Amino acid sequence: MARGWRAACRRAALGLAALAAGLIAVLAPPAPAEEVRLKDLVEVQGVRGNDLLGYGLVVGLNGTGDGLRNSPFTEEIMANILERLGVNVSGEAFKSKNAAAVLVTATLPPFARAGGRIDVTVSAIGDARSLLGGTLIMTPLNAADGQIYAVAQGPVVAGGAEASGEAAKVALGVPTSGTIPGGARIEREVPFAFTGMSVLRLALRDPDFTTAARIEQAINTAFGRPVAAMTDPGTVTVDVARARMASPAALVAGIEGLRVDPDERARVVVDHRSGTIVMGEDVRIGRVAVAQGNLSLRVAEAPVALQPNPFAPGETVVLPRSTAEVTEAPGTGLAELGGGSSLADVVAGLNALGVAPRDMIDILMAIDAAGALHAELTVR
C-alpha cells in the first residue's frame, strides 16, 4: 500500500515537472536575432577607393635579382634612373644581379588627403628569385586617368624565403612579392563633393529584398518619419533634407550604428583545391538517397631472375611478372536523407558514410544536379 502510494507520488511529481517545462518553453521569449550594424551591410555610393599602379626598381638584393640578359627592361630602367642622377651609362654592359624590375600596386582610400601614407604591394615581373632585403626606388603611382596620385619608396618586407644547393632548391611562401607598410605618400587628392549631396544612396554589399526592406524600416523608425525608401534589392535612398541633419556626413554617422537583422540566401560554397565546404544554416535537402563506393586498382611488379646452372653456358634472364587487381570496398549502402533535412542532418548523414571532404563535394554537386539541394551552390 505504501509502495503504491510512493509510486503514485513520483508519477505526479514527474507530471508536474513536465507541465512546468512545457509552460516555460511556451512562455520563454524566442532567441534574439543576430543583428548587424548598418555600416557592415552597406556602402555609400560614390565613397570608394581608387586603384594605383606604378613601374619601379628594387635594388640592394643579395644576388637574387633579375638576370639582365633575360630581362632587358630591368637594364633599361636602371639606365634611365642613373642618367636622371647624372651618371652616363651609355654603351655600358650591366652584369649585376642585385636589382629587379617590379610592379607597384596600391589603393587610394576615399577622402585621403595630400601628405598621408598608404601601403603598397611590390611584385617582381622578371626572373628575380627573391625580393628579400631590397629597397624600392622612388616610383610614381598613376590612376586610371594617367595622373600621379602618390609616390612610393622604401624597404620591401617579403614574407617568403628561398634556399638552393647544387641539385636542390626549396622555397617557403612567395619571396618574389612583398609589401611596404606606409610606403607611398599621397601627392594628389580625388575631388568629391560629399557635402553637396541631397540624397544618399546606400548600396547593399549582398543585395536582398528582405534586408533592404529591414534597413528602410530601421532608418525610418530611428527618425520617426519616412526619410528612407527602398528602390531595389541593392539600394536604399535616404533624403538628407527630410532627415534634418546638419550635413550628409552627420547623417551617415547617425545611421551607420543602427542594428539590422540581415536575411541571407541559403548557400553552399565548395573549394575543390583545398577541399573546403561552407554551408549556411538555412540549407535544406530534399528526399534523396546517397551511396558511396571506393574502387581501387592495384598493379604490382615482381620480376623473376632465371640463372643457368653452375658452370653451364648461358646468361641470367629477368622475366617480368605483374599482378593487377581491381577491388571495391564494401559498400556503405544507401543513406537516405528525408525531405527538408537541415544542415546538421546533411553533415551527420554524410559523416555516417565515412565520406572524405573531397568526396563530399562531389556528392553535394550530384545532389544539386538531382534537384534535391535547396540552396545556391558555388564551386570555386
Image (cartoon, rainbow, N blue to C red):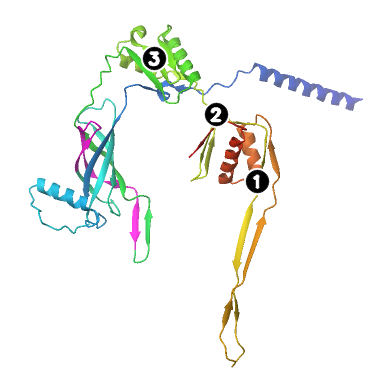
Which residue in the structure is indicated by mark 1? 292
Which numbered circle lies on residue 266?
2
Residue at x-position 27% and y-position 56%: 64
The disc at residue 66 is: none
The residue at 25%/18% (across/down) is 193
Q: Closer to the observer: label 1 or label 3?
A: 1
Disc 1 to disc 2, C-alpha distance: 25 Å
The magenta stretch spans which residues? 138-164
- Amino acid beneath label 2: Ala
Callouts 1 and 2 close, C-beta under 8 Å: no
Real-space CA distance between mark 3 and mark 2, rounded to the nearest whole angstrom: 27 Å
Residue at 48% x, 16% y: name it. 213
Query: Given contact means CB atoms under 8 Å apart, are the residues at marks 3 and 2 in contact?
Result: no
Residue 141 colored magenta?
Answer: yes
Q: Position of residue 171 (x, y in %)?
A: 37, 55
Depicted 132 relative to depicted 105: above or below: below
Gap in angstroms between the C-alphas marked 1 and 3:
51 Å
Q: Which mark is residue 237?
A: 3
Q: Earlier in the sequence, mark 1 or mark 2?
A: 2
For badge 1, the amino acid type reads Gln
Residue type at mark 3: give it.
Answer: Thr
User: What residue lies at 43% left-to-right and 24% top-to-bottom?
Assistant: 41
